[in-house]
């Protein structure tokens, strides 16, 4: 059996794609025939998915370009690449902290406007450069909002640069808490971070809760002259309020990865075109991670790093595995067991996990008779609450 993976949009790392081997093929069929997509920030909210599509691998961290609830409803598992581009974003953010605090944009523009001999320019430099004098990171306070893969790295490295670091993340995972330097002080009220930080950087997803978080109510609490960075998502910025905070002298420099015409004439704003994760290393990491998750899912049914289903793994030792995506309602496991019993088949292993409205089951069967397995699949396909049924043959177990 061959599994067809289709890349959607460009910018997908070619080295990672070239590593794909049989039974997988890349870009050999049209979109409607693909078993899985690999994409980056391509928007899918208005996209009609084919019934054949089983999985989407997002070669990146954020997945707000994909309608993950609708995908779950249609039996499509969406994977991302957690941490795959975290180092790339961290390096850009640390660079932008220095860039903003040392007035490098204005200094560069001033110097480029100078004409005359090198000696004449040098003389003017010595007179003018005090205007561009900045300050150092060491000893200052950085507030990191969102302490996941990127935020925890930024926080730890800022500590190494001699900064005091405050971190705010009400949903911090145990894994990231473990990775965080014990010198990073966690605050439980955003206000404390806003009031005490000289630098503030956001590293959380765009959600209804984070939308417009950089607004006047929050920015007006900040210290005068704060350096503000958004290399997460555009939706987190309330642009009108950021400009107001710049005018009020609260924000000295705003570095953002997202463009907007309203910023074009503001010297204190520095724009980059969504470059945070755009390094060749991050592209390779993220594409490999997305491909790995998608290939594992297509071949074994195991779910690792999905964003709309829980992690579900189980070693496949029996000849047949049936995977089921079902509505997360009571009694489904009992219904599955009864259906198996009706076909007089023995269950070798079963795991069922739910997340939100949907659940996923790996059902491994002690049965060699393919006809009986097909009859069971037929039963499941007609059952209430079952969204998708797949049969996976274990080549080694036959
Ligand atoms: N500019 C880029 O190119 C680029 C690259 C990678 C990621 N991103 C964006 O950055 C975000 C963070 O990436 P990551 O890899 O660190 O993701 P992550 O999932 O590892 O971490 C996100 C963190 O945000 C926290 N969080 C969620 N809601 C919060 C809230 N209301 N307040 C504070 N914290 C909250 C979570 O608990 C989690 O720890 C992504 O969601 C993505 O949108 C942008
Ligand atoms: O694919 C990209 O370049 C964007 C990456 C970034 O926004 C992410 O969320 O990982």
Image: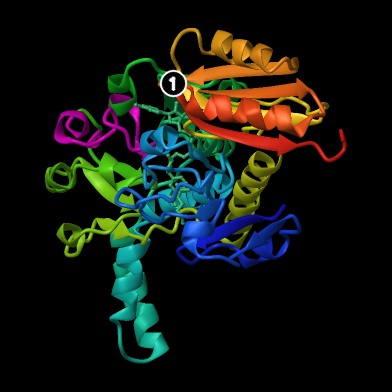
* Residue range (magenta): 195-220
Question: Which residue in the rendered view is the most extreme toward the bottom?
Answer: 117
Horizontal side of 291 relative to 388 (left or right) equals right
In the image, residue 240 lies in the stretch drawn in magenta: no
Color encoding of the figure: rainbow
Residue situated in front as seen by the camera: 38 or 27: 27
Q: How many marks?
A: 1
Residue 180, compared with residue 337, is above or below; it is: below
At horizontal 25% and vertical 47% (from top left) the residue drawn is 252
Q: Quadrant of residue 205?
A: top left
Q: Position of residue 148 (x, y in %)?
A: 50, 31
Disc 1 CB within 8 Å of nearest ligand 1 atom: no
Residue 50, compared with residue 241, is above or below; it is: below
Residue 177, compared with residue 130, is above or below; it is: above
For disc 1, the neighbor class at 10 Å (few under 14, some 14 to 19, many from 20) is: few
Q: Position of residue 97 (x, y in %)?
A: 42, 48
At horizontal 53% and vertical 21% (from top left) the residue drawn is 173
Horizontal side of 141 relative to 303 (left or right) equals left
Q: Quadrant of residue 126?
A: bottom left
Q: Position of residue 203 (x, y in %)?
A: 42, 37
Residue situated in front as seen by the camera: 73 or 203: 73
Q: Quadrant of the C terminus?
A: top right
At horizontal 42% and vertical 20% (from top left) the residue drawn is 356
Secondary structure mostly seen in the magenta stretch: loop
Give SS at disc 1: loop
At horizontal 54% and vertical 56% (from top left) the residue drawn is 34
Residue 129, compared with residue 122, is above or below; it is: above
Residue situated in front as seen by the camera: 281 or 179: 281
Give the residue at mark 1: 384
Residue 45 at least partly seen: yes
Residue situated in front as seen by the camera: 153 or 364: 364
Residue 159 at least partly seen: no
């Amino acid at each position: 059996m061959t599994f067809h993976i289709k890349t959607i949009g460009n910018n997908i790392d070619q080295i990672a794609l070239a590593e794909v081997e049989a039974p997988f093929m890349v870009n050999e069929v049209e979109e409607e025939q693909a078993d899985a997509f690999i994409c980056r920030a391509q928007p899918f909210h208005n996209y009609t998915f084919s019934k054949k599509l089983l999985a989407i691998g997002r070669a990146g961290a954020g997945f707000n370009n994909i309608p993950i609830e609708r995908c779950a409803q249609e039996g499509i598992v969406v994977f991302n690449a957690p941490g795959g581009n975290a180092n790339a974003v961290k390096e850009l953010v640390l660079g932008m902290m220095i860039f903003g605090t040392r007035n490098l944009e204005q200094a560069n523009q001033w110097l480029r406007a100078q004409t005359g001999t090198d000696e004449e320019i040098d003389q003017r430099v010595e007179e003018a450069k005090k205007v561009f004098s900045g300050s150092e990171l060491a000893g200052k306070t950085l507030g990191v909002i969102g302490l996941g893969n990127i935020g925890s790295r930024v926080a730890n490295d800022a500590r190494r640069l001699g900064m005091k670091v405050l971190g705010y993340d009400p949903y911090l995972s145990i894994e990231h808490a473990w990775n965080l330097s014990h010198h990073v002080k966690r605050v439980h009220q955003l206000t404390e971070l806003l009031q005490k930080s000289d630098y503030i950087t956001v590293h959380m997803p765009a959600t209804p809760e984070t939308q417009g978080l950089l607004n006047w109510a929050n920015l007006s609490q900040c210290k005068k002259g704060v350096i503000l960075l958004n290399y997460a998502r555009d939706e987190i910025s309330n642009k009108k309020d950021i400009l107001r905070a710049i005018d009020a002298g609260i924000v000295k420099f705003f570095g953002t990865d997202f463009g907007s015409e309203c910023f074009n004439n503001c010297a204190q704003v520095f724009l980059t075109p969504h470059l945070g994760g755009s390094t060749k290393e991050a592209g390779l990491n993220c594409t490999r991670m997305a491909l790995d998750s998608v290939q594992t899912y297509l071949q074994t049914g195991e779910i690792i790093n999905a964003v709309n289903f829980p992690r579900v793994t189980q070693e496949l030792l029996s000849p047949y595995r049936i995977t089921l995506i079902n509505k997360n309602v009571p009694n489904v496991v009992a219904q599955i067991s009864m259906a198996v019993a009706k076909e007089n088949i023995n269950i070798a292993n079963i795991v069922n996990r739910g997340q939100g409205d949907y659940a996923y089951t790996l059902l491994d069967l002690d049965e060699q008779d393919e006809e009986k397995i097909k009859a069971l699949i037929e039963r499941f396909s007609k059952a209430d609450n079952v969204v998708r049924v797949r049969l996976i043959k274990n080549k080694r177990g036959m």
